[in-house]
Amino acid sequence: MAMTAAITVLAALSCSFWAVSAQQCDIYNGSWVRDDSYPLYDSASCPFIRREFDCQRYGRPDHDYLKFRWQPADCDLPKSAITISKSLSLILSANKRKKVMLVGDSLTLNQYISLLCMVHAAVPNAVYNYTRGSDGTYTATFQYVDANRWDYIQDGQQIVKDMDRDEAFSHAMQTWANWVDSAVDPATKRLFFTGLSPSHYNGSEWGEPGRTCAGQTEPTSPSNFTGGSIPQQVIVNELLKVKAKQVKLLDISYLSQLRKDAHSSKYNGANFSNDCSHWCVAGLPDTWNQLFYAALIA
């Protein structure tokens, strides 16, 4: 099962924008509701979108997966891409030399492209400097750093070719948490950890044995989901109770587990026959960025 954890590192910001009160509301407790005002932007108008996420361009025939909004049980998320993106840009431009940096693998890239498309939807006439493989620079600067390197694993002085995945993940997270506690100044930086992104290759997790994400057009209802917690996310949750306490968890795992319909599947330009790991843009990663924004300004 392909999953990722992504670390989003942000400069310390001070803002007085209106926001959901995430301190009084669990924004991760909720449900998917249909909203015909969605999506937040037209992917065809985003110059940054990559082919592996561009489901509409590569032939996805339905649009229903674009029409679902995450609704927390006790509050509302900022809904407008324009509100979110302009606020992010204003926050960063008011704090010179501040940056938003996303560090991770191709699933973090999924979130990064979504964020760029949201910003572009808000300020389409801004001057953009975007070079694939390097920084994307705007009035506000957003960076993506590819950190997907798992060919060899070093444990102390020992380098091994293979290791139990959960054990390796736990060791890596311990190392990262120790670095956060020793090297990151919470007075100058804010850290967010985007939770594990699930794949949907096993239909028994939602009551359809033998099925995958292929051909799915609606979210799974909570009552039909039987997949349980992602093991690596349990490791993250336990670690953040005792270390790296300055880190804010963006707990996107459960709400994403319900979105078997939102993957790029065969509708990508990268010749993947059935990609049930990555997500269409526009789509689910936009919700991750809504949650990031809500946490940022809370």
Image (spheres, grey):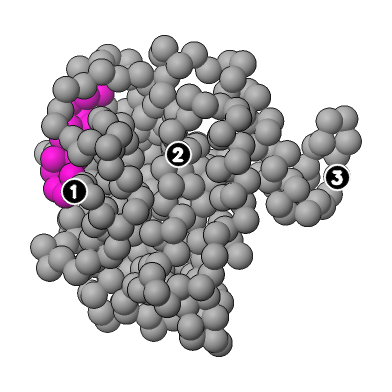
Q: Position of residue 139 (x, y in %)?
A: 23, 26
Under mark 1, the amino acid is Asp
88 w.r.t. 198: above or below: above
Queried whether the magenta region covers residue 188, the answer comes back as no
Residue name at image x 42 percent, y 77 percent: 224
256 w.r.t. 168: above or below: below
Name the quadrant of the C terminus. top left
- State which quadrant residue 64 falls in: bottom left
Closer to the N terminus: mark 3 or mark 1? 1
Q: Residues within 10 Å of mark 2 (few under 14, many from 20)?
A: some
Residue located beneath label 2 in the image = 249
Residue 208 got which mark?
none
Q: Secondary structure at mark 1?
A: loop
Residues under labels 3 and 1: Cα distance? 47 Å
Under mark 3, the amino acid is Val
Range shown magenta: 78-93
5 w.r.t. 172: above or below: below
Q: Position of residue 117 (x, y in %)?
A: 26, 48
Under mark 2, the amino acid is Leu
Closer to the N terminus: mark 2 or mark 3? 3
Residue located beneath label 3 in the image = 160
Residue located beneath label 1 in the image = 76
Residue name at image x 26 percent, y 53 percent: 72
Q: Position of residue 11 (x, y in %)?
A: 38, 21
Q: Is residue 153 left or right of residue 298?
A: right
